[in-house]
Image (cartoon, helix red, strand yellow):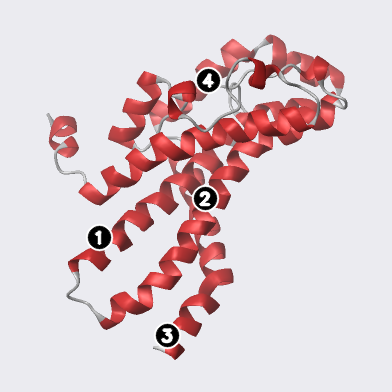
Amino acid sequence: MNFFSNLFHINRYVILARVVIVLLILPLHEFAHGWVARKFGDDTAEAAGRLTVNPIAHLDPFGSVLLLFTGFGWAKPVPINPARMRNPRQGVIWTSLAGPLSNLLAALVGIILLQVEVPFLNQHLDNVVLYGIYYFLQGFVSINISLAVFNLIPIPPLDGSKVLMMLLPYRQSMWMQQRQQMLSILLWILILTGILSTPLSWISGWIMKFFILITNWIGTLIQMVL
């Protein structure tokens, strides 16, 4: 009962931010994987029609609905073939990092837009439109950072696990590859029990503070002009 009650009380600006994430950022995340793989010589994603930001090519129905209602979700993974890469080890590492980095870049753009908007909001505290933009950008930035941090967890099938497997010695890497299904179950247990919530929130908060710190000059400059 509480779950359904919460669904109907989600801030409409957060819902709008989640819709944008589903239709724009999830496809961008997967496109980034495919684009970097292509740069390393692997055209598997391109041949599969996944080297595009068209959401139809990337969206997973269940992962998209889950993200809309909870802020946590996923798209269909882009296929890659390390054997086609000129340097498979580096190729897999950078291809895996490309998705989370695209989320961090999107979050940084959102922070910059917030820094531009806040001085105007401070001068027009009764402006409903400016408040709407503010809450939308807050949700947009928060979800992007959370997605980046979550995907960097070094547990299969997340992007961080592929990076870790390329960095580990051969024996440990093979151990992870052979136990991916078991480790994926472990990941779901960690998610459902909430064990990951505190460390992920702490890391996400630190990234948010860092982005605000390095972009503060934008808001200060605009405030001086106004």
Task: For residue 22, say whether it is visible.
Answer: yes
Closer to the N terminus: mark 2 or mark 1? 2
Question: In the figure, is residue 210 to the left or right of 46?
Answer: left
Q: Are marks 2 and 3 in contact (CB under 8 Å)?
A: no
Closer to the N terminus: mark 3 or mark 4? 4
The amino acid beneath tag 3 is Gln
Residue 31 placement (x, y as % from top left): 59, 32
Residue 91 got which mark? Answer: none
The amino acid beneath tag 4 is Leu
User: Is residue 36 shown above or below 123?
Assistant: above
- Which residue does the image show at 30% across and 61% down from the upper left? 133
Disc 3 crowd rating (10 Å Cα; few below 14, some 14-19, many 20+) is: some
The amino acid beneath tag 1 is Gly
Label 3 belongs to which residue? 223
Residue 177 placement (x, y as % from top left): 71, 14
**Label 3, label 4: how far apart the Cα atoms are:** 49 Å
User: Which image quarter holds the N terminus?
Assistant: top left
Disc 1 crowd rating (10 Å Cα; few below 14, some 14-19, many 20+) is: some
Q: Are marks 2 and 1 in contact (CB under 8 Å)?
A: no
Disc 4 crowd rating (10 Å Cα; few below 14, some 14-19, many 20+) is: some
Closer to the N terminus: mark 2 or mark 4? 2
Disc 2 crowd rating (10 Å Cα; few below 14, some 14-19, many 20+) is: many
Residue 132 got which mark? Answer: 1
- Which residue does the image show at 77% across and 32% down from the upper left? 39
User: Is residue 67 shown above or below 109?
Assistant: above
Q: Are marks 4 and 1 in contact (CB under 8 Å)?
A: no
Local SS, label 3:
helix
Label 2 belongs to which residue? 106
Question: In the figure, is residue 15 to the left or right of 90?
Answer: left
Residue 186 got which mark? Answer: 4
- Which residue does the image show at 55% across and 56% down from the upper left? 207
Local SS, label 4:
helix
